[in-house]
């Protein structure tokens, strides 16, 4: 197998994933939430609890920028810091109930768009996609 060709295919695939993600989320406007803040909320939703360092690293933000945006989300009561009882210098970040409700609503909207996107696929095609995602998740993205 030509690993260079596989890499090029991977680059095209990840670029497509980013484009589809952008297309799905671009029409979702949440009042008083910036795109960066939405990305933080999305990351917390699927990975909580998270740390500030994890947010910075995953979203390619500096620690000061991540901290500033997180502070705004905390002030909006969408997430909260919980101090680690074993090490009071550390804290985990979680969604609040208000943040969970917001993201549940957003994910519901995204699911509707996703369902629309796959509505013309056969059961066999859906099964192939499901299997491909399982393989990618276990073999590459784990």
Image (tube, rainbow, N blue to C red):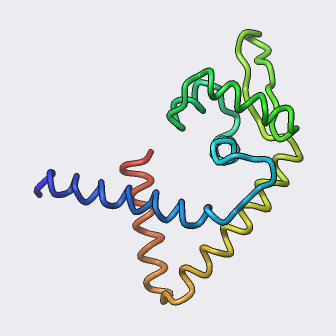
Q: Tell me what residue is drawn at x 41 percent, y 76 percent.
A: 128
Q: Tell me what residue is drawn at x 59 percent, y 66 percent.
A: 24
Quarter of the image for residue 134 reads bottom left
Residue 75 at x, y = what percent?
86, 32
Residue 108 at x, y = what percent?
74, 67
Instruction: Please give left or right for residue 106 compared with residue 7 in the image.
Output: right
Quarter of the image for residue 137 reads bottom left
Residue 74 at x, y = what percent?
82, 32
Quarter of the image for residue 65 reads top right
Q: Tell me what residue is drawn at x 80 percent, y 15 percent.
A: 85
Q: Tell me what residue is drawn at x 42 percent, y 52 percent.
A: 138
Residue 39 at x, y = what percent?
63, 46
Q: Residue furthest left?
A: 2
Instruction: Please give left or right for residue 117 compared with residue 49 in the image.
Output: left
User: Residue 119, relative to residue 62: is it above or below?
Assistant: below
The quarter of the rendered structure image containing the N terminus is bottom left
In this view, the residue in front, 43 or 132, is 43
User: Residue 84, relative to residue 47: is it above or below?
Assistant: above
């Amino acid at each position: 197998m030509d690993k260079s060709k596989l890499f090029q295919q991977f680059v095209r695939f990840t670029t497509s994933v980013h484009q589809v993600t952008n297309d799905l989320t671009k029409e979702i406007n949440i009042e008083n939430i910036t795109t960066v803040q939405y990305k933080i909320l999305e990351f917390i939703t699927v990975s909580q609890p998270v740390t500030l360092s994890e947010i910075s690293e995953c979203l390619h933000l500096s620690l000061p920028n991540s901290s500033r945006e997180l502070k705004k989300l905390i002030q909006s009561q969408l997430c909260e810091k919980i101090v680690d009882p074993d090490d009071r210098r550390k804290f985990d970040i979680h969604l609040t109930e208000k943040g969970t409700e917001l993201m549940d609503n957003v994910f519901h909207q995204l699911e509707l768009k996703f369902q629309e996107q796959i509505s013309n696929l056969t059961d066999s095609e859906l099964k192939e996609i499901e299997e491909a995602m399982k393989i990618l998740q276990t073999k590459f993205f784990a």
